[in-house]
Image: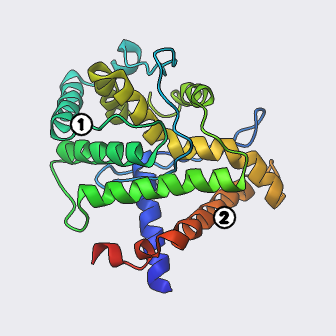
């Protein structure tokens, strides 16, 4: 059991590293936001799948501003480095067309982002291959999504996701040139690639944002108490891990890497 707990905690750390930030939002009047600064030398993340939503020409793209207002604070040499790494990552792995918020999309874009980070850091993990890391990330993100669908009133909706990402840009993308410029390069190559990457990047905070009020009601959490809200997140997170373990115990027994 201690081995299982350590593996769960380790995977949770990887998830935080890829998402870059976890948001604890109380309500429309008062928000409690807890950010986690991450070292990009450590990578990876999580979420789930619902009824496939077909992408149509009328689907509104999320506007990720990467113009002078957001890049002026990034030295041109560093910006070129980010963009070059993104292009190189795309040459090494180009994600297939896939449904929004699907396990396939999560895994493809987790792999692409991992490759991008390894190019940026000029390093690779000796313990876990990019493919193995991407598989885990997809499993965890899919687990969050399916858990939220089964236990709370959650359904992925492109409009609400667009709104959520637009609101959160000021808190995340503006401060994270590595991710912002990566997504910008994907959008220049293919708008849908950029959108799938946004869904991967914001999957966990989006799901949490959508279910937190219902979860707070279930646990009788005081919206004025920051520690209670943070504890609520970790409580739900543990339930998600247990939910995933029901169908995938090997990931919590260390067998996947043996």
Q: Position of residue 32 (x, y in %)?
A: 68, 44
Q: Earlier along the polypeptide chain: callout 1 or callout 2?
A: 1
Figure coloring: rainbow
**Residue 4: assigned label:** none
Give the residue at x 53% y 66%. Answer: 244
Can residue 257 be seen at all in this image of the molecule?
A: yes
Give the residue at x 64% y 41%. Answer: 155
Q: CA distance from mark 1 to mark 2?
A: 36 Å
Q: Quadrant of the C terminus?
A: bottom left
- Image side of residue 1 versus residue 77, left or right: right
Residue that numbered label 1 is attached to = 94
Residue that numbered label 2 is attached to = 235
Q: Position of residue 151 (x, y in %)?
A: 71, 56
Above or below for 216 versus 173: below
Quarter of the view holding residue 207: top right
Above or below for 43 versus 100: below
Please tell me how crowded label 1 is: few (under 14), some (14-19), or many (20+) other residues with Cα within 10 Å: some
Please tell me how crowded label 2 is: few (under 14), some (14-19), or many (20+) other residues with Cα within 10 Å: few
Give the residue at x 49% y 22%. Answer: 62
Q: Secondary structure at mark 1?
A: loop
Above or below for 117 versus 74: below
Give the residue at x 52% y 27%. Answer: 170
Q: Secondary structure at mark 2?
A: helix
- Image side of residue 96 versus residue 148, left or right: left
Q: Position of residue 165 (x, y in %)?
A: 54, 30
Contact check, label 1 and label 2, Cβ < 8 Å: no
């Amino acid at each position: 059991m201690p081995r299982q707990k350590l593996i769960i905690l380790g995977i949770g750390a990887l998830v935080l590293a890829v998402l870059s930030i976890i948001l604890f939002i109380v309500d429309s009047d008062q928000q409690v936001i807890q950010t986690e600064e991450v070292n990009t030398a450590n990578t990876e993340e999580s979420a789930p799948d619902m009824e496939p939503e077909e992408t149509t020409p009328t689907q509104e793209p999320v506007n990720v501003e990467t113009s002078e207002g957001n890049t002026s604070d990034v030295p041109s040499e560093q910006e070129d480095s980010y963009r070059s790494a993104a292009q190189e990552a795309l040459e090494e792995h180009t994600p297939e067309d896939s449904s929004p918020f699907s396990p396939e999309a999560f895994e493809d874009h987790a792999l692409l982002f991992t490759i991008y980070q390894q190019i940026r850091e000029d390093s690779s993990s000796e313990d876990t291959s990019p493919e193995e890391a991407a598989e885990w990330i997809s499993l965890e993100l899919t687990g969050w999504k399916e858990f939220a669908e089964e236990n709370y009133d959650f359904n992925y909706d492109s409009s609400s996701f667009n709104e959520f990402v637009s609101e959160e840009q000021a808190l995340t993308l503006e401060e994270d040139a590595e991710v912002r410029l990566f997504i910008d390069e994907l959008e220049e190559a293919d708008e849908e690639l950029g959108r799938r990457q946004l869904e991967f990047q914001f999957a966990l905070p989006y799901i949490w944002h959508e279910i937190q009020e219902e979860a707070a009601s279930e646990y009788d959490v005081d919206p004025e108490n920051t520690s209670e809200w943070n504890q609520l997140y970790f409580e739900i997170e543990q339930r998600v891990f247990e939910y995933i373990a029901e169908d995938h115990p090997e990931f919590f027994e260390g067998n996947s890497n043996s």
